[in-house]
Amino acid sequence: MKILAIGKNYVSTPDEISANKTGNQIIFSKPETSLVKNNQNVTYPSFTKQLNYEAELVIKIGKKGKDISLDNAASFISEIGIGIDFTAKDIFNASREHKGPWDLGKGFDGGAPISRFKPVTNFPKLDDINFNLIINGEEKQVGNTSLMIYNFSDIIAFTSKFMTLEPGDLIFTGTPASGTGEIHKGDHIQASIEGELLLDFKMV
């Protein structure tokens, strides 16, 4: 199973999309060991002093595909969930400073908590899905897929040029343009899609 993610994929207003849609999608991966499922609590990593959160919709691939056309790309989505892309920001920044890879700052154990998934048929308009993130009872992020620079189909068509997508593969599709920040031990994290609470855990 592959876990892919796209960076810097949301804008604040729809009129910003065209200027940012350059074709240069930022794609990175996380290992399977980064996943945390079933709303289990997440252990705060011992190696970082700055852990940042990004709430993201996660699409699950339902069938095998390579060089998928843009028109057909949405049919490869079987389910949609929500997850957190955690970044050990101090580790990440140190690596980027020397033009190094993102792996240690993004791919650590517990770096990708995910919710249970809902059938894609529950979402008749993929370009109009609402989601949000609440930390300690305070709403921190609000997103809608209409503000994506690259929508689900764009992401699938692009990534499938380089690698075969297979059933069960997960793609984190980007976080809202504002509201990301630092997470601390003891914080209570809740994330919802269309008002339904799907992700609910604590940092321990």
Image (cartoon, rainbow, N blue to C red):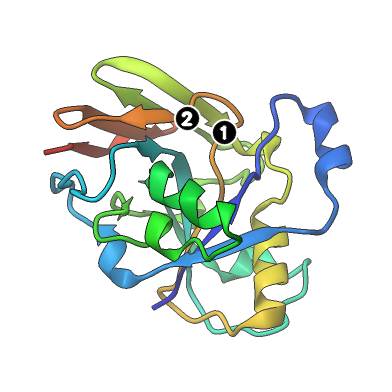
Query: Which residue appears at 44% of the width and 65% of the height?
Result: 103
Question: Image check: 149 left or right of 65?
Answer: right
Camera-nearest residue between 104 and 164: 104
The reply to whether residue 84 is visible in this rendering is no
Q: Nearer the viewer, residue 77 or 159?
A: 159
Residue 180, numbered label: 2
Residue 187 visible from this viewpoint: yes
Q: Position of residue 2 (x, y in %)?
A: 44, 75
Asked if disc 2 and disc 1 are in contact, CB closer than 8 Å, the reply is yes
Q: Amino acid at mark 1?
A: Pro
Instruction: Name the element at disc 2.
Output: loop
Q: Secondary structure at mark 1?
A: loop
Identified by mark 2, the residue type is Thr
The correct choice, above or below, for 86 with respect to 185 in the image is below
25 to the left or right of 145: right
Q: Which residue is mark 1?
A: 176
Residue at screen point 17% across, 46% down: 42
